[in-house]
Amino acid sequence: RTRLRPVRWIGLSGFRAGMLRTHSTYLLCRSLFRRRLACGILAESLVVDSRMSGPLTVFVSATSRDLIDCRKAVEGILLDGDIHPKTQEHFPPDHRTLTEFLKASVGECDAVICLVGPVYGAAPESNPNRSYTQMEYDAARSLGKPVFVFLTGERFEPTQPPADGPDGLELQRRHRLELMQAHKCDVFDTVDQ
């Protein structure tokens, strides 16, 4: 595989100037986030500080009950583009609390992709009003990580239906509304979109 000269980009939303390290990464970025690029917005999650070395690492956040197939699809696309995905399927055993571990894991990544459906998911007993996936998003924002948000559309058919109670569904509905206000979100109805 031939490595081409890096292309210099300016990050949006307050992110620093960075460097897209290879042409193949650019092509992946263009393919994966084509709607954003068509709107003239560079995929902030792939804007990297030019002093960085090594492969890009992207944290992929999604609930397992409804979005496991989507998370695996994104993982495959990232791997095809020589970008290392970090997903819960590959979390090692750790001595820290899950909350501490998630924040540290997000902190090790260059960007975060959030796949968000109607499922609230699991939450720590110490903070039942924030699910683990919501806490991954919170960690990314607090650490200043570029965040891409992809929401399921009305026609999306989940792998498994939500098992959340009314409180969890309402918390997730509010979270989705907050995301739509804070980000330019893309919507998908199938795994292939």
Image (tube, rainbow, N blue to C red):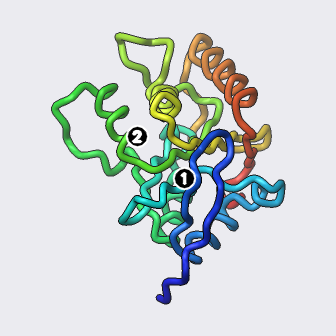
Q: Is residue 125 above or below residue 158?
A: above
Cα–Cα gap, marks 2 and 1: 21 Å
Judging by the rendered image, the residue that carries numbered circle 2 is 106
Q: Is residue 156 above or below residue 39?
A: above
Identify residue type, mark 2.
Answer: Val
Identify residue type, mark 1.
Answer: Asp
Crowding at label 2, few (<14), some or many (≥20) Cα neighbours within 10 Å?
many
Q: Secondary structure at mark 1?
A: helix
Q: Is residue 85 above or below residue 119?
A: below
Q: Nearer the viewer, residue 22 or 163?
A: 22
**Any mark on residue 69, and which?**
1
Residue shown at the point (52%, 40%) measured from the top left: 62
- Residue at the farthest left position: 95
Sequence-wise first label, 2 or 1? 1
Residue 91 in percent (x, y) is at 30, 45
**Any mark on residue 3, and which?**
none
Q: Nearer the viewer, residue 26 or 137?
A: 26
Side (left or right) of 96 relative to 30? left
Q: Nearer the viewer, mark 2 or mark 1?
A: 2
Residue shown at the point (48%, 28%) measured from the top left: 142
Quarter-wise, where is residue 29 in the image?
bottom right
